[in-house]
Amino acid sequence: MRDEDREALSKVPAVTLGFWIIKVLATTLGETGGDTVSMTWDLGYLIGTAIFLSILVVLAVWQIAAKRFHPFLYWATIIASTTAGTTMADFATRSLGIGYAGGSALLFLCVIASLAAWYSTLGSISVETVRTAKAESFYWMTITFSQTLGTALGDWVADSGPGYGGAALLFGAALLVLAALYFWTRADRVLLFWAAFILTRPLGAAVGDFLDKPVADGGLAFSRPLASTVLAVVILLLVLILPQRAGRHGSEPETA
């Protein structure tokens, strides 16, 4: 690869259909994995947050220090961010007693503040520009806030009436609307990306809860550790099978 081509590559994967499939599965694993530690193993939200946040920090530092895109490292960091997001959101909405509405509002402000600081500092919040340590630091901070926000939103909607299955259908429909806007309108691509990135998390939260919650609560009562293991294996296989390539700086996000 020529030097100029290497420099043009970002530190994150190209935004393809495969990217979104793995992202949804990763967010589902984040829900079942986070609940396994905090609920099934009864370690609680605070200890669960300490465990997953520590793992996230280690992986994020490793990812930022890497010289090029590494698929397994990237997706391990995504999974760490979504499991940490699960326990952090549950701690905020339940242990701190601020509820789903308060937690979602607080986390939404955190996402907006992170994006605003990123834009103010570097002039762009496009993932296509994630090539430097500073840009990637903002990227992972924003992702972690968005994963945490998505967890709170998913639980809020599911517990407000439609249940876990209904919430999954609702967020899935919202993602289809974003896809339609992408393909058939001139809507801002960067805005659509972050909207989709945030909405995949409550979709995963709803699907994860649907898999492992008791039947009486509208779930399928699958074993959380078993569901988490199956999801992890599927993600591993998809990372191996689906093309994994770094995005290119300055190019439009890819769609396939």
Image: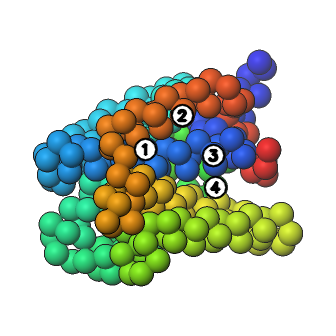
**Callout 4: SS:** loop
Which residue type carries mark 4?
Ser
Q: CA distance from mark 1 to mark 4?
A: 26 Å
Q: CA distance from mark 3 to mark 1?
A: 13 Å
Which residue type carries mark 3?
Ile
* Residue 50 rendering spot, x and y as whole percentages: 19, 45
Q: CA distance from mark 4 to mark 2?
A: 25 Å
Q: Which residue is depicted at the point 24% across and 70% down?
A: 93
Quadrant for residue 215, please give it: bottom left
The residue under label 4 is 126
Q: Which residue is depicted at the point 53% across and 45% down?
A: 25
Label 1 or label 2, whichever comes before in sequence order:
1
The residue under label 3 is 21
Q: Which residue is depicted at the point 21% across and 62% down?
A: 91
Q: Which mark is residue 182?
A: none
The answer to which of 59 and 101 lies nearer the viewer is 101
Quadrant for residue 242, please give it: top right
The answer to which of 125 and 219 lies nearer the viewer is 219
**Callout 3: SS:** helix
* Residue 33 rendering spot, x and y as whole percentages: 34, 43
The residue under label 2 is 235
Residue 125 vertical placement versus 162 (above, below)? above
Q: Which residue is depicted at the point 31% across and 76% down?
A: 100
Quadrant in which the C terminus appears: top right
Query: Disc 3, disc 4: CB below 8 Å?
Result: no
